[in-house]
Amino acid sequence: MPGPARLVVLVSGSGTNLQALIEAVADPVYGAEILAVGADRDGIAGLERAERAGLPVFVHRVKDHGDRADWDRALTASVAGYEPDLVVTAGFMKILGPGFIEAFAGRIVNTHPALLPSFPGAHGVTDALAYGVRVTGCTVHLVDAGVDTGPIIAQGVVEVHDADHADGGEALQERIKTVERKLLVDVVGRLAREGHRIEDRKVWIPA
Ligand code: GRF
């Protein structure tokens, strides 16, 4: 029997999705282990969570590299060093470079706080709210060369309440994140245990 799937997780912020994965992998039945956590910035709660869990961390800030291509090479090399089966971008707020995407093609899993293909980009929650949608949610998808354009694996739906317009989307974001954490843990576990294939934008995970 093959061992647990090897994960590297990339974060930029509070790391609550990372925390959910840390808790999930504690159960051997889940079928995955986190080898390391990478970030594009220092001083974030996401890295503290990783350190508290005893996980190796690495940071590559764009500004510490000559240009974006150098940053991409450094990030790719750090992640590749762990020989991951899957890379999970969990609130990683940088667009991955072409080298990175090629190195881990079809194996990068991202979570986005809106129902793609609507409201891609960095402001998915507030863009959906401003548009006036009545339902929004989250999307777990594979990463391709575009921004939030890769094949969709799973989506979760969250209703928008009238009151959500009063607080700038804060409460809505928290409701989305609650659904998102469960969805991400579920999808990553299924990918880890069952594998997947991609056919004409559809992601198939054996039942
Ligand atoms: C998530 O909602 C993710 O979809 C978005 O940023 C948030 C990250 O949250 N891109 P956290 O850092 O996992 O708490």
Image: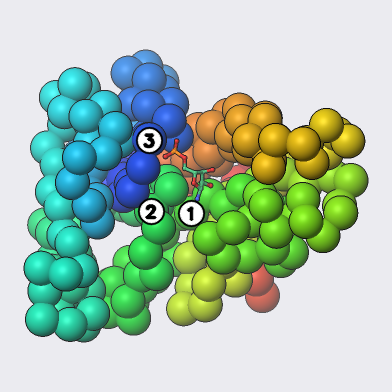
How is the rendered protein coloured? rainbow
Where does residue 123 sit, x and y in percent of width and height?
59, 58
Label 1 environment density (alpha carbons within 10 Å; few <14, some 14–19, many ≥20): many
Q: Is label 1 in contact with label 3 (beta carbons under 8 Å)?
A: no
Q: How far from the left and from the top, in percent, is residue 3?
A: 27, 35
Residue type at mark 1: give it. Answer: Asn
Query: Disc 3 marks which residue?
Result: 14
Q: Residue 80's spot in the image, x, y percent?
A: 17, 61
Q: Which quarter of the figure is the N terminus placed in?
A: top left
Dividing the picture into quadrants, the one containing residue 56 is: top left
- The residue pinned by badge 1 equals 110
For badge 3, the amino acid type reads Ser
Q: Tell me the quarter of the picture where residue 187 sits.
A: top right
> Does the beta carbon at disc 1 come under 8 Å from ligand 1?
yes
Decide: few, some or many residues near mark 2? Use Cα within 10 Å; few <14, some 14-19, many ≥20: many
Residue 132 visible somewhere in the drawing: yes
Task: Provide the secondary structure element on which disc 1 rests.
Answer: strand
Gap in Å between the C-alphas at discs 1 and 2? 8 Å
Counting residues from the start of the chain, the first of labels 1 and 2 encountered is 2
User: Disc 3 on helix, strand or loop?
Assistant: loop
Q: Is mark 2 within 8 Å of ligand 1?
A: yes
Which of 27 and 55 lies nearest the eye of the viewer?
55
